[in-house]
Amino acid sequence: MTQITHVIKRSGAVVPFTHERITNAIYRAAVAVGGRDRSIAEKLSQQVIQVLEDRQEQQGPPTIEEIQDLVEKILIENGHARVAKAYILYREERARKRKERAELASRPSENIPWAKIWHILDWAVDQGVHTTACLSERIRKGDFPEIVQASEKMYEIDVENAVEMIKTREDELRIVIITGPSSSGKTTTTTKIGKRLERLGLKLVTLNVDNYFYNLDMHPKDEFGDYDFETPQALDLPLINEHLANLINGQQVLIPFYDFKTGMRTDKLTPMVLKQNEVILIDSLHGLYADMTSSVPDEQKFKLYLEPLMQIKNSIGEYARWTDIRLMRRMLRDAAHRAYDPRQTLNHWHYVRSSEMRNIIPYISTTDYIINSAMPYELCLYRSKLIHQFETWVREFENDPLRVDAFTRAQRTLNIIKEIPGVDNDHDVPGDSVIREFIGGSTLEY
């Protein structure tokens, strides 16, 4: 039991000290350079705590910066230079992100597909769904079915465009990568694209990268016992690349299987080989992460990116955040398929977003095509299902210094959905809609 009870955050807030955070920070840095021995991280964190306890008698509670400086020092003194470098780079990245957030209002982001955004905004204005007030008025007039139809049509046009682009490159393509952040609609879109391509004589064969997860005991976790599956380093990237190269060269490989119930991987299990008209499909959060497919030349890849690029703002001029739309989608899907409470999804989302900002968003500009999976009508469905919980979270987390991220997201999302009417009946939503992936009732076979 450590003598340290509290730490001082950058904001000046004093919060309870949890020693597992130090262990996890060291272990994450080790994982980034290939290390998987958590016991070493635990021993090093104990050294950090011992120094902090010696200092506390004279200085009082440590600051976050003091702890991080000390972690760097202990790593270097114990001969872990590569881990120390990874930790330092992570700190620098976080500092840069904080600075970027502060400057965001004064400059445009390079990671936003502006041409696509303007097209979607123009469509939203034409449809009268570009503000919560306009959307509400159309819903009150009974236009929900028409909004559904128009939204689905726009999405299907994007899907058809992607199929045509893939088909024109079939002679050189060996991999189709369908990617995007969590709950962007990859599963439904992949199914639709696969069926269309098969009718054109080109078959996508899935390499399920989820089977390449390391065993659960090798994953970092936080002080709440929450494992981080959102980073590409959670996957055995060298083995993925070895199998990709062998498959493209016409060789058979034995695919592993990852059991999410036990958290264990069984290697060399299922044989896989490519036929003449087959192309590898990778449907993954981290499909754009270069190290995942580094063994394959770029000209042999088609990279498709998905995001709900919704353009709608509320009465105080705040646009709906795409990450908040995906958060609501994942809450519903987690609750339906993983027995995961929406509150858990909210509290875990900072991991999701942090990994997206490091490993997904920076690579948007490398994609061949972007599909907008947003449907303005989906907000009405989510309001009915989630608004009371968002209201509760805003009240509960408002003054909790450990849940600032959860409070911010809950408040921001509530500001959008509280201004539109809820729709309880989803019978107007097509059975093959991308939204069915989250609200249930899909007629597609995933």
Image: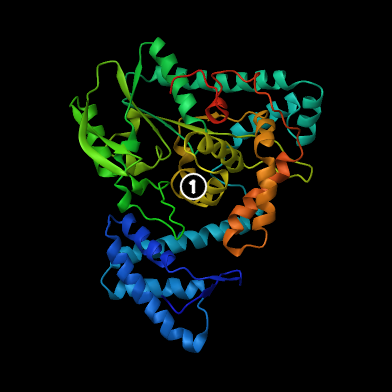
Q: Is residue 140 found left or right of 161 in the rendered image?
A: right
Residue ID at (48%, 36%): 180
Q: Which residue is mark 1?
A: 352
Relative to 8, residue 105 above or below: above
Residue 8 in picture, x, y percent from top left = 55, 73
Q: How is the image coloured?
A: rainbow
Q: Nearer the viewer, residue 218 or 225?
A: 225
- For this orientation, the residue located farthest to the bottom is 58
Residue 306 visible in rendering: yes
User: Helix, strand or loop at disc 1?
Assistant: helix
Residue 45 in picture, x, y percent from top left = 36, 70
Query: Which amino acid lies under the numbered mark 1 shown in the image of this protein?
Result: Val
Residue 132 in picture, x, y percent from top left = 76, 36
- For this orientation, the residue located farthest to the left is 251
Relative to 353, residue 147 above or below: above
Relative to 110, residue 308 above or below: above
Residue 311 visible in rendering: no
Q: Quadrant of residue 198?
A: top left
Quadrant (top left, top right, bottom left, bottom right) of the C terminus:
top left
Q: Nearer the viewer, residue 297 or 330?
A: 330
Residue ID at (73%, 24%): 127
Q: Nearer the viewer, residue 78 or 106?
A: 78
Q: Quadrant of residue 368?
A: top left
Residue ID at (43%, 39%): 285
Quadrant (top left, top right, bottom left, bottom right) of the N terminus:
bottom left
